[in-house]
Amino acid sequence: MLYEMIAVVRVGNINEVKEIARTAGALILAQGGVVRGITNWGPFLLTKPVKKNQAYYDSGHHFIMRFDASPSAQQLVRKTVAIDPRMIRCGVVKMGSRLNDIVDVKGTVEWQRSRGSWMDQLGVD
């Protein structure tokens, strides 16, 4: 099954982000999965302040990882990454389970900077 993990790490040292992504990737590979790609979106303001481990965060370093793995491997990755004190938030979404659903999905996720293209896709004037 194809999954997409969106992770928000505390802002500061880029090596912390790399280490968390490397740990998640190693867990996926150890469980027989495949990492399709990792996209670094960089630091962004959060929509609202978040309290995690007795600290408040108003910004975070975002990255996205797309990977193929079993449901048990996905659960292990999510739990392992979530208990890391450097993490602010983490979410995993299943993108598809059949080959027809996931065959054309790329490993990277591009950020759409222009609002017009997003609004055009929805057909909103």
Image (cartoon, rainbow, N blue to C red):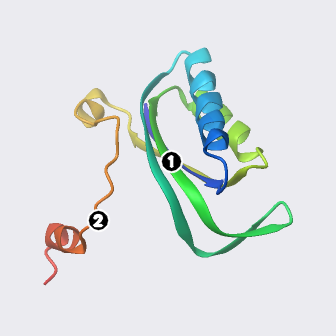
Q: Are marks 1 and 2 in contact (CB under 8 Å)?
A: no
Spot occupied by residue 36 in the image (x, y as percentages of width and height): 39, 28
Residue 23 lies in what quarter of the image? Answer: top right
Residue placed furthest toward the right: 54
Spot occupied by residue 104 in the image (x, y as percentages of width and height): 22, 34
Residue drawn at 50 percent across, 26 percent down: 69
Residue marked by disc 2: 113
Spot occupied by residue 2 in the image (x, y as percentages of width and height): 41, 34
Q: Is residue 22 or residue 119 the one in the foreground? A: 22
Can you see residue 72? Answer: no
- Work out which quarter of the rendered image holds the N terminus and state it: top left
| In the rendered image, the vertical position of residue 79 relative to residue 60, given as above or below | above
Residue marked by disc 1: 63
Say left or right for 27 vs 121.
right
Residue drawn at 34 percent across, 40 percent down: 108
Can you see residue 38? Answer: yes
Spot occupied by residue 86 in the image (x, y as percentages of width and height): 74, 49
Q: Amino acid at mark 2?
A: Arg
- N-terminal label among 1 and 2: 1
Residue drawn at 69 percent across, 41 percent down: 81
Residue drawn at 14 percent across, 71 percent down: 120
Task: Determine the CA span between mark 1 and mark 2.
Answer: 16 Å
Q: Amino acid at mark 1?
A: Phe
Callout 2: SS: loop
Mark 1 crowd level (few <14, some 14–19, many ≥20, 10 Å Cα): many
